């Protein structure tokens, strides 16, 4: 699932201050890689309303990866509708960078890929977030088995604050 293509960058002056500049993809990608917390939005069965929940994730080989128990609402939602939105940013109004990723959550089951993601979790969050890779294509940790999903971006938005600017990246 490695993504090496650079996205097309589009600056939207309609929602930006005159002094604003496009946020470079490298800056937005670094924010995705370094953020400690993310919010995933999924669609409930029948599309009746969205479900939003915080989680930790890692940016690995061009996609955000997260895990969740098979019985959790987000996993059940993704089984029916894999399209989702993952966001991260800063709650301050006048500083920081908020980033929004749209894409499909694809289940990761390959043992080598899962091990690489498990290693990325430890590198980012420490041994407290160590996962073993089970033969059934899941992570196993203190909370029991977990499904692993990768969200390769179809579109990403960066919302700069301080000097407000909106940048879109199309893949």
Image: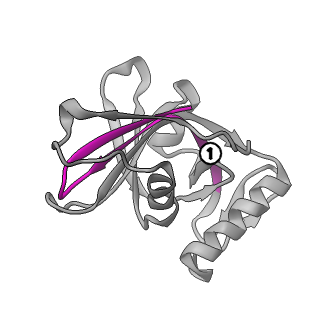
- Residue at (16%, 43%) from the top-left corner? 17
Q: Quadrant of residue 142?
A: bottom right
What x and y, as percent, mark residue 70? Answer: 59, 45
| Rendered-image quadrant of the C terminus | top right
| Rendered-image quadrant of the N terminus | top right
Residue underneath mark 1:
149
- Range shown magenta: 146-171
- Residue at (32%, 57%) from the top-left corner? 89
Q: Is residue 45 visible?
A: yes
Q: In the drawing, does residue 143 fall left or right of residue 156?
A: right
* Principal secondary structure, stretch drawn in magenta: strand
- Residue at (52%, 25%) from the top-left corner? 81
Q: Secondary structure at mark 1?
A: strand
What x and y, as percent, mark residue 147? Answer: 64, 49
Q: Residues within 10 Å of mark 1 (few under 14, many from 20)?
A: many
Q: In the drawing, does residue 165 fall left or right of residue 6?
A: left
Vertical comparison of 80 with 34: above or below: above
Q: In the drawing, does residue 46 fall left or right of residue 163?
A: right
Q: Is residue 135 visible?
A: no
In the image shown, does 21 or 57 lie closer to the viewer?
21
């Amino acid at each position: 699932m490695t993504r090496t293509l650079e996205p097309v960058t589009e600056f939207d002056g309609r929602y930006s201050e005159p002094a604003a500049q496009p946020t470079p993809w490298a800056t937005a990608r670094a924010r995705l890689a370094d953020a400690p917390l993310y919010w995933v939005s999924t669609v409930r069965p029948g599309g009746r309303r969205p479900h939003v929940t915080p989680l930790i994730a890692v940016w690995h080989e061009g996609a955000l990866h997260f895990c969740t128990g098979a019985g959790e609402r987000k996993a059940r939602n993704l089984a029916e509708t894999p399209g989702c939105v993952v966001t991260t940013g800063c709650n301050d109004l006048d500083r920081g960078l908020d980033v929004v990723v749209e894409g499909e959550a694809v289940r990761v089951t390959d043992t080598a890929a899962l091990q690489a993601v498990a290693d990325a979790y430890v590198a980012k969050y420490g041994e407290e977030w160590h996962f073993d890779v089970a033969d059934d294509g899941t992570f196993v940790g203190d909370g029991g088995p977990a499904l692993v999903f990768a969200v390769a971006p179809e579109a990403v938005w960066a919302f700069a604050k301080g000097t407000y600017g909106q940048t879109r990246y199309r893949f």
